[in-house]
Amino acid sequence: QRTMANDQQRLLYLFELPQEPIQTPRGGGSVQFKLENDDTPPSVATRVGLSPSVSVPVPERKDVALQDLGTATSIPMGSAFSFFLASHRRAARDLCNVFMKTNGAEDLMQVAARVHGKVNETLFIYAISFVILRKKELHSVRLPTMVEVFPSRFVPQEALSRAQLQVNRMDPNQSEAVIIEHGPEFSGSPVKPEHRVSYWREDYGINVHHWHWHLIYPPGMGVDRDRKGELFYYMHQQIIARYDMERLSLGLPRVQKLDNWRVPIEDGYFPKLTVNNSGRAWGSRQDNTLPKDFRRTEIGDPVDITDLEIWRARLLGAIHQGYMVDRNGDKVPLRDDVTSGKRGIDILADALEADADHSVNFPYYGDLHNIGHDILAFSHDPDNAHKEEMGVVGDLGTSLRDPVFFRLHKLVDDLFQEYKLTQPPYKEEELFLPGVRIERAGVVRDDEADVLLTGWNTREFEASRGIDFNGRPVILRLTHLDHKPFDYHIQINNDLREPKEVTVRIYLAPKFNGREQEMNFMEQRILWCELDKFTVHLKPGKNHVVRSSKESSITNLEELTFKDLENSGPGNSSEQSAFNFCGCGWPQHMLLPRGRPEGMAFQLFFMLTDYAKDKVSNPGGVRRCANGVSFCGMQDAKYPDARPMGFPFDRRPAPTLQGLPVNTTADYARLGNAFMHDVTIKFLGDKLN
Ligand code: CUO
């Protein structure tokens, strides 16, 4: 018997083999869905091969004309789709509009199945995911991991071709899966220092997170989300801080901002991957490539390096003048301490990211971030002379792989930090919470205190969901960094006579900089990485709070594979909905930096703030979404923390606290509601398990 839940679950099959039209019978006798109005008559669509049990009855329905798709067909199949290009954003909007007009899961599947395999593959997956996340009636549909939809984004083409050959040579009666192992060497040799962090940049989880984040917070898609600009700043700032922690673990210097577009970019990048499972190679960039004016007129208006320089200068001018100028010539003040309306950081970020719909003055402040991505993505072939594909830094789901991504985003973050330094430091009364005191705080793992362990682990995915290997199972076994789970233990005295609700904020930073020196507040300020943030109810007197690392406010539950989704069945829809939205979130296995084999010193910073002041009222009830909330916000609700993101490290230090000057973060820990504690992170390599 068909149920609504079944309809929703069947949407999953739209994500399989994104490069192949659903109506077309493929080699090896595999046919996915057969639809009414096809040349082939059956009214029951049967998926044969990978998921033989799935049978999809298809009621009669009007066809979808390709001309109704607007500019969605303008991006060729098999080529890259870049959300950083205005023309591609338009195509996405056009396709999303078609899908948004459908009514319910069955209708969406009917329309989408006809479009599947006829529009650009990544665009299709983007649009169908976007619509599933936006449509209330589809909130219980969960998205399968991009690793299985587009294996070609995660493992080199060479490995996929080898698996194909192996499958071709296999005895047809042989049933075991072919296994593709990938990592931990990833894309390059240790000859280049940047490759020492390849395992991190090329981690499947952080790239999927980045794809998913931008899917929820897209510019130019008519989506208005609470504090979107601020979260753009904060989430990317935290990625850079985490990247720097990783680099310091490996003895590499912190990432340098891409300050000068007129000199060659030292580090090249050779992705070895293909676009859309299509076999078409992503562009690669040689070492010492000079960024050039963008002249890919087939996909966008020309833009010069000079434009980037002018936009940056205008943004800096606005930051230092304290206001932006809108299209009417009126001043729009940039201040974070507004109690209503947009905060300065949101206004600045919307003009920087940028987005013609939300920028306060798009022609004037331009499009620094998106065009920055474009210029870098096409620096190897800026005018299409070689007919080369864009580089991976042009795609939301692959851009973190390229070292230049971090240099660009360090430039972006530099502007945000410049703005943040114009804001008044927090006053003692904003930092201090009288009456509650942290007596002790630290971490415990397997009965050992204050030593955390990292090392390699593996995770398996089905590559054969995204690519047809003659209908045979092919498994990707990806190596990734991981750590042993641990608990935070916090002993808090509540000296008030009544119970008190507090927000607990936990951050991690390296104890020493690249010169092995302790850092002052300003140097360490932008290295603090959020580990967790949660609310606790303190009874009067002593409280012992224990919290698992798995519950982190920034992390997602693990990636959902097709098999997970098929096996889960229709369940509690609100729980599933939370899960889906939180599909956005930093991967749990990347919560900690790798540290060093001999152990590396890090510091934990704990702070309690008054929940009565932090809480945000969400009329209509708060949707539960326990995971990834600090990086991803909540579905259909306001961002659940009234403080500026990154508090208290987003601003300069208070000049004095309790009458004494502030030089280091430890001076903040003089406040009873704050606490600092040293921990060691040891990298065990293969010996983690
Ligand atoms: Cu996430 Cu540049 O915004 O990649």
Image: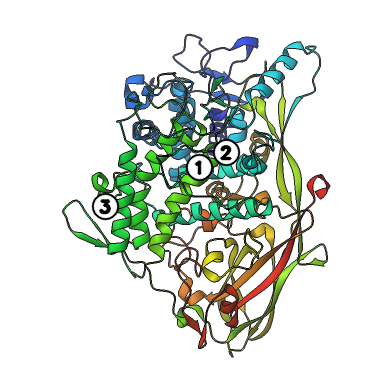
Crowding at mark 1 (Cα within 10 Å: few <14, some 14-19, many 20+): many
CB atoms of marks 1 and 2 within 8 Å: yes
Q: Is residue 673 above or below residue 683?
A: below
Q: Do the numbered discs 1 and 3 sit on residues whose CB atoms are within 8 Å?
A: no
Element on which disc 3 rests: loop
Front label number (3 vs 2): 2
User: Residue 360 shows which numbered tag?
Assistant: 3
Front position in the image: 5 or 396: 396
Is residue 326 at least partly visible in the picture? yes
Q: How far across and down, in percent of the image, does residue 188 sit?
A: 66, 33
Q: For the N terminus, give its image quadrant.
A: top right
Instruction: Find the distance from the CA under tag 1 to the CA under tag 3.
Output: 26 Å
Residue 408: x and y, percent?
Answer: 46, 45
Amino acid on which the number 3 mark rests in the picture: Val
Q: Mark 2 points at which residue?
A: 401
Mark closer to the chain start, 3 or 2: 3
Ligand 1 within 8 angstroms of badge 1 C-beta: yes
Q: Residue 405 carries which label?
A: 1
> Residue at left 61%, top 21%?
47
Question: Measured along the vertical axis of the image, is residue 292 above or below residue 258?
Answer: above
Q: Local crowd at mark 2 within 10 Å, few (<14), some, or many (≥20)?
A: many
